[in-house]
Image (spheres, coloured by chain):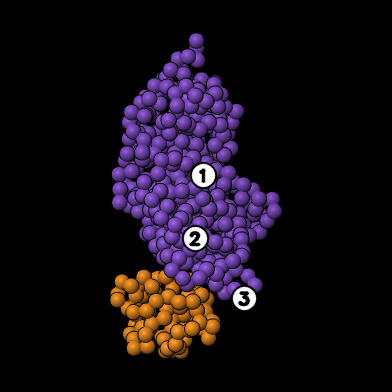
Chain colours: A orange, B purple
Amino acid sequence: MMRQKEKRLIAAFYTTHDAMAFEDYCQGHGIPGRLIPLPREISAGCGLAWSAPPEIEDVLPGSLQDAGIAAQHLVLLEI
Amino acid sequence: MIYLDNAATTMHKPPCVTDAMIQALTSLGNASRGAHEGALQSNRLIYRARRTLADFFGCPESEKVIFTSNSTEALNIAIQGTLRKGDHVVTTVLEHNSVLRPLYRMEQECGITLDFTPADARGCIDYEQLAHLIRKDTRAIVCTHASNLTGNMVDIARVGQLAKEHGLLLIVDASQTAGAVPIDMEQMGISILCFTGHKSMMGPQGTGGMCIHGEIEVEPLKEGGSGVQSFLTRQPREYPTRLEAGTLNGHGIAGLLAAAEFINETGIDVIHTHEMALTRRFYERVVHIPDVTVYGDFEATTRSPIVALNIGDLDSAIVADELAYSYGIATRAGAHCAPLMHKALGTGEQGAVRFSFGYFNTPDECDEAAEAVEQIAQRMHQ
């Protein structure tokens, strides 16, 4: 039985290095979410993506900026 | 055994290196080959290692810390990945074959030209001569930080200034200095720093890497699996993936990271001071022994912890074997993969016995080794 789909805010990255740097940033700043395999709806340089609750849609762009990371995509997806 | 072959590899590692590797062997998946916890743990460890080593070497961008299997691989990538037909390269006679052979190959197969900065009787280069070798078509200076034979150090900051003035790449072989003396790529003007993990870094064999400073296009030697962008027909262009085809040595990198953290916690200056004291202690005793010839510049303020010597005209292999067999002292004899340095010192036939000291050596071990040299020198006439 597959778990039910839900809306997630997905940040995709150009490189794995960026993905790991963003995870490190989020863990250090209490930003919710986790790394997941890149959903097929998105094409990106890195096979990992940051999956966050949609409620932090207003927060995440600023977090990426603070972390010095350019996301390749930042989208809401039902996955 | 008294282990005095640390320039070949440090046999005694900090316990935290062993612990980190055992932990890694039982917990790491394959970095960039999945998003499960095992793969992520490996990714996290490698990311932390890049950050730590970037800080360690003054490399401004941690994604430009590239992991390789040793400094030979790093030097091959740096040399073959940047130089092109028509390029002129200035190097030195101090170089190891890990620099010389890739350069000779590029000379024979790719049409680069080479010039060698000579060394004097002590094995020191003349920086004015190095500057005079630079031409209009010079593209790079490829230079060791310290001779693996004499331990003499090159003033890399001075060479870096020269490279900057002429707009040249400076590729540095730090095999003998990474972990033994502070290195700051930014301050020293190094374009590409190549290092090994298993010598003064005190990490495991099979580790090493290169740090790239700024916007330098280095073409990969290897192409293959990257875990990302699988439908590209060629290796992705982004660093570090560009130069890291295939599965990384995550277990080894765990050990290398632990070793770098050990050096940071201990203090590289503390380590350097200890190793210099051992080197000086041994040198002061053997230099006065009749029939002993010591090679290198011991008036310099800093050097790599190496003392290379010969006893009379004895074959260096015989001396090293006597040290190992009769005294339990591990050294290295022979040509040390540095043919031009041997020619400059006149030791092409005899080779040299190299004593190289590490952080875990003691003053007593230095004294025992010096005593053994004295006894062998005395017996030479019996």
Co-location on one chain, circles 2 and 1: yes
Relative height, residue A67 to residue A77 (above, below): above
x, y (%) of residue B69? 53, 53
Depth check, mark 3 against mark 2: the one in front is 3
Distance from Cα at disc 2 to Cα at disc 1? 33 Å
User: Which residue was labeled with disc 1?
Assistant: B129
Q: Give the residue at x 38% y 51%.
A: B19
Q: Residues within 10 Å of mark 3 (few under 14, many from 20)?
A: few
Relative height, residue A26 to residue B45 (above, below): below
Distance from Cα at disc 1 to Cα at disc 3? 50 Å
Farthest residue, direction right: B109
User: Which residue was labeled with disc 2?
Assistant: B66
Co-location on one chain, circles 3 and 2: yes
x, y (%) of residue B191? 48, 58
| Badge 2 element | strand
Q: Give the residue at x 30% y 44%.
A: B270
Q: Residues within 10 Å of mark 2 (few under 14, many from 20)?
A: many
Query: What amino acid type should be assigned to the residue bearing mark 3?
Result: Phe
Chain ID for label 1? B
| Badge 3 element | loop
User: Which residue was labeled with disc 3?
Assistant: B231
Chain ID for label 3? B
Distance from Cα at disc 3 to Cα at disc 2? 23 Å
Of the numbered discs 2 and 1, the one sitting upstream in the chain is: 2
Depth check, mark 2 against mark 1: the one in front is 2
Q: Which mark is residue B142?
A: none
Q: Horizontally, is A76 left or right of B313 in the view?
A: left
Q: Give the residue at x 50% y 57%.
A: B249
